[in-house]
Amino acid sequence: MTSPRLSLSTLDGALPRPHVTGPAVDPRDTTIGLVHLGLGAFHRAHQAVFTEDAAAATGETGWGILGVTQRSARVAGQLAPQDCLYGVLTQGADASALRVVGALRDVAFPGSATPHVLATIAAPTTHVVTLTVTEKGYRRAPDGGPDLADPDLAADLAALHDERDGAEAAAPGRSPVGILVRALARRRRDDAGPLTIASCDNLADNGAVLRSLVDAVLAAAGDEALRAWVAESVRFPSTMVDRIVPATTDAHREQALAVLGLRDEGLVVGEPFSQWVIEDDFAGPRPAWQLAGATLTADVAPYERAKLRVLNASHSTLAYLGALRGYRTIAEAIADPELAAVVRELVDTDVLPTLTPPDGHDLGAYRDEVLHRFADPATGHTCVQVAMDGSVKLPQRVLGTVRDRIAAGAVPTAAAVTIAAWIAYVRAASSGGLEVAGRAVPLDDPMADALAHAAAGPRAGLVERMLAVRAVFGADLADDQALRRAVEHALTQIAPGA
């Protein structure tokens, strides 16, 4: 017999139950005031929870979320039949708990609902837009500006032109920045008031990056009036987010079903730890996120840089090295004493000298906390999941450290190990020679073809060919002979037969 599915009507009859917490706000009384682009597991386990807790702390009912999927309608199809309810299964080393979240009040896929998405962003009752679209979702060119040759962004620019005179949106939104500029044009036209747009992706200075991308796209569109309005009326605070959110498995769904008694197709999983640091720069109202545990600050940069260079860089290093050794999860990889020593050497030797601690923070203690979190097998974060999109992640997570160490007159030998591990991973995955847990692993990367071309061929010259991929390394690192020698040496140790 099939179990009933989670929804507003079935949830009423399912609670109370041990180890299950219901929504902190009444979804029936909650209206939309926030739009989120990138309705993946991370948002549902992180920003949506903070937003619900903030609303519960103040009693405000206007901070419901419209969640917008990006690449497919799959998540919207999972959540819509559940009245947008879903569970967050928090798993620690010793215990687990299930929380049903009700902050998400509507879902949409731009492929079929772009007019609804644009209208909601442009509504005067919407005050904040947040994004988790991954690093590659911003469609940046090698110089950091918008990739105007990207077909999805180009299609949105064409639609912006068509909608300039007030025509209703017809073309589906195809890129996050494209959707934003089209919605901002409508918001200005409707005189709906100021707006705050907050990137929550792992990009250094993510708020400034997003602001510059929006401005450059509007400049390319030739819309100077809209550019001026955005400069005056829209704020782009930077943020730093942190919570390990592994892929949801059938075993997780069975576990949730056992404690809730309802089938949940939108279930997400997260570790107990959760952090959100937000630049206190808003154009108008916002949820009282500080009452939900978020940190509001004038300067996110020290937090953001520490997270990218300590946590994310260590995560990627373990992912590449762990996959090369056949480990399925990050927890398995860090249990290997040699790999644990590699990431500790990376942080202590190359990363920490480049960082300024946020006020009151001990970066050595932060390193230890990060490595302890990685070792928790309950999270189930896989090496292959973390290793994907390396061409976009590596510049954000590792190469800033490399450049800072070179500028200080040091050869970043520990960070060179991470670069070498990535090169070995790319070469193995692109040639069909990488197997993890008995399954072949292909190269999953937006630059897969170019990387495969550089990685193919004789072992001699491999490092030189890979460092010459300037979209990743730029001209400065490609031509740095000391770095090349350090990466070559590390690659010889990691994959002597590659």
Image: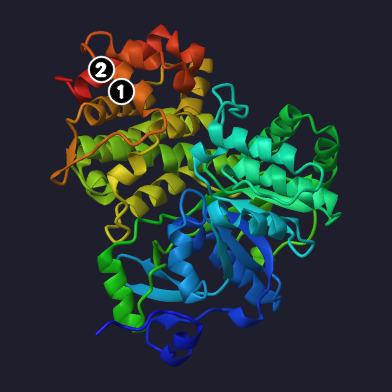
In front here: 475 or 433? 433
Query: Which quadrant, please, contains the C terminus?
Result: top left
- Crowding around mark 1 (Cα neighbors within 10 Å: few <14, some 14 to 19, many 20+) is some
Residue placed under numbered mark 2 in the picture: 456
Query: Which quadrant, please, contains the N terminus?
Result: bottom left
| 253 relative to 208 in the view: left or right | left
Disc 1 vs disc 2: Cβ atoms closer than 8 Å?
yes
* Residue 332: percent from left, percent from top: 22, 49
* Residue 32: percent from left, percent from top: 67, 68
Task: Residue 406: tell me if it is visible.
Answer: yes
* Residue 270: percent from left, percent from top: 40, 62
| 262 relative to 53 in the view: left or right | left
The amino acid type found where label 2 is placed reads Ala
Indicate which disc residue 113 carries.
none
* Disc 2, SS: loop
In terms of image quadrants, where is residue 346? top left
Residue placed under numbered mark 1 in the picture: 452
In front here: 400 or 199? 199
Q: CA distance from mark 1 to mark 2?
A: 6 Å
Give above or below for 431 relative to 329: above
Residue occupying the point 48% across, 21% down: 471
